[in-house]
Amino acid sequence: MPQQSGAGASPSSAPAYGHSIAPPAPPSERSAAPAHSEQQERQRPIDPPAPPGGFAAESRPVKVPSPPADPDPVVRETPAYARAPEPEQEPAVGGDGDESHVEAPESRKTTAHIAIGEVLQIAGSSSRAVLDPKRLAECAGEFDPSVRLAGLVGSQIKVRVGQIWLLASVRTQSLDRATGEIIAEIDFLGEGQEEKLTGRIRNFTRGITHYPVPGAEVFAATNADLAQVYASDGRANIQIGKVFPTKDIRAGLYIDAMLGKHFALLGSTGTGKSTSAALILHRIVEAAPEGHIMMIDPHGEYSAAFRGTGQILDVGNLKVPYWLMNFEEHCEVFVTNKGTDRQSDLDILSKCLLKARAKNRMADQMSRLTVDSPIPYLLSDLTNAIQDEMGRLDKATNTAPFLRVKTKIEEIKADPRYQFMFSGMLVADTMSEVIQRLFRMPSNGKPISIIDVSGVPSEITSTVVAMLSRMVFDFAIWGRDEKTRPILLVCEEAHRYVPNEKNADSSSVGRILSRIAKEGRKYGISLGLITQRPSDLAEGVLSQCGTILAMRLNNERDQDFVKAAMPEGARGFLDTIPALRNRECIVCGEGTAIPMRVTFDDLDEHKRPASEDPSFSELWNESGGEEEAVDRIVTRWRAQHR
């Protein structure tokens, strides 16, 4: 490793990665060339021998004649991102003695062609590089926003191996007090070819095939490099914002890669999570207007965002027949006993449910009828079957289990809160119509269905979500012989339905969502999880999400949980999660070429969910209409309907 040069070190002893070395001038000009200090010599933008030709070409001085009457020379146009004011000019080195050689001011506006350090150690998981703090300070004054952050945690750097550029992310920084150098841990993200004319990265791909050797020079990745890296490779994609720290590079997500292997959107309350979720879904709907998306909305906040492009379903118009439940879901609703006698209640329900389903004429056409078969039946047939079984008992037999199950069924049947599911009008065979409406088949211009479960009684909310999720899975399984119709299931507040082992309550919704996460992609089901408490989410489910969008997380346990689920190459980005601003996120995984920090686009007012925080300072300075508002609220409260 070369020794770090001090302020008074001679150019010959300075490390190669901090300097751009020019070829010697001819003898006829060597005496005429003005003397320069070491600092001036080091900053002179002359083509170095080792760094890539593209950046050197941009900074190579252009020799043009300047008439004596016109002191302003003709200069070469330089890309806008490399321009910055430069007050002084230096004569170019070399050339004929009868011409005035003045290098273009724009050609000295960037020092990206000068190395900022060198590779120190190469390892499979994480490598190390030594960075020159003086060069980092110089980069901080660059006009290019990407070069300005060169070497900092979360920034991108590049290493040249032959004709290939390797792109890496800086994970950590530490100071070597003995030498004054900065030691950085870096994660290699991918590689691309060197563009001959400009020296930029092109044809970027994830993964590394050629590792550098220790001593290889490290350079700052420029805005132009990142534009090539984040450019679409032709696959279908949606654009959701801008790549930080740039102002013009669009951040895109590959639709098939993101949905094919599930995705998760994580963020604390107040970070803009709901608006960001709405933005992503709006972009997907715009790109695929004939899609099939079903979203579970536990708070009723997304109805306002998708009134124009979605079908809004709540307890008033959901109309999901009770007989679509399988036996496990029946047990969650009708069996309340948690003690040692629970199994006897389950046996009674199983026997009587099978008898009730068998009374339907469709059962005669089926070779195999089970308690899980979605055959319509009457609740009265179920209670009559329980009564018949109870009548066959011996006098000494306990009738309590039969009475418990029968009483619970009658209570739910009579409760108006459950009419969206247990109404007597839902006994007809409407299974095809229900599936078409829920899964948007056909979409009829509204490819997304918002299932507002905020009005569903809390006792059966998990069961309703489990039934809807299972219907998606069963439809995909039994539809394998048909033309594939992929379905996206989005679950807001996912930690409520797929809790970790500590908070697990043995509900069926956790099991079905876990199964979808593990097996769904085989059948064309995509799962989108949205949660503010990722640490309360089942670890196995989050690990199945191929694309993770992490917004600011205030809880340290949540941060550690997300870091454990992220790929190694994103660790440098993850360290910035606590410092993210609202509507910013770290994206990594299958849906993007490499990990990136994204600032989400603004969303039109009519496309935003009803999740904005109230302004206390404004509302508490207003008065009037409180009595009428209270009356309206009481009316809706009593009717249990919005």
Image (tube, rainbow, N blue to C red):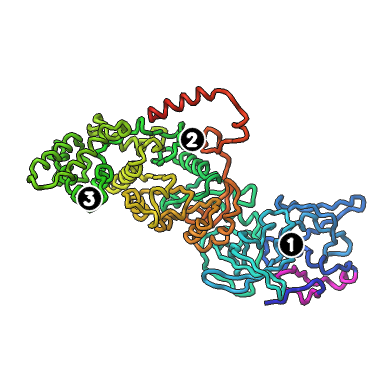
Q: Amino acid at mark 3?
A: Arg
Instruction: Look at the picture and state if 361 lies above or below 97.
Output: above
The quadrant the C terminus occupies is top left
The residue labelled by disc 3 is: 342
Is 319 positioned to the left or the right of 212 in the image? Answer: left
Kindly tell me whether residue 520 is visible in this rendering: no
Q: Residues within 10 Å of mark 1 (few under 14, many from 20)?
A: some
Residue 476, position in %: x, y?
Answer: 31, 47
Instruction: Look at the picture and state if 393 lies above or below 16.
Output: above
> Cβ–Cβ below 8 Å for labels 3 and 2?
no
Give the quadrant of residue 485. Answer: top left
Q: Secondary structure at mark 3?
A: helix
Is 72 positioned to the left or the right of 605 in the image? Answer: right
Foreground of the two, 582 or 440? 582
Circle count: 3
Residue 366, position in %: x, y?
Answer: 15, 43
Question: Does the stretch in magenta take in 13?
Answer: yes
The residue labelled by disc 1 is: 137
**Residue 305: image tag:** 2
Gap between marks 3 and 2 measured at Cα: 44 Å
Q: What's the magenta region?
A: 9-31
User: Sequence-wise, which precedes: disc 2 or disc 1?
Assistant: 1
Q: Secondary structure at mark 2?
A: loop
Q: Residues within 10 Å of mark 3 (few under 14, many from 20)?
A: some
Q: Secondary structure at mark 1?
A: helix
Gap between marks 3 and 1 measured at Cα: 71 Å
Q: Residue furthest right?
A: 69
Q: Amino acid at mark 2?
A: Ala
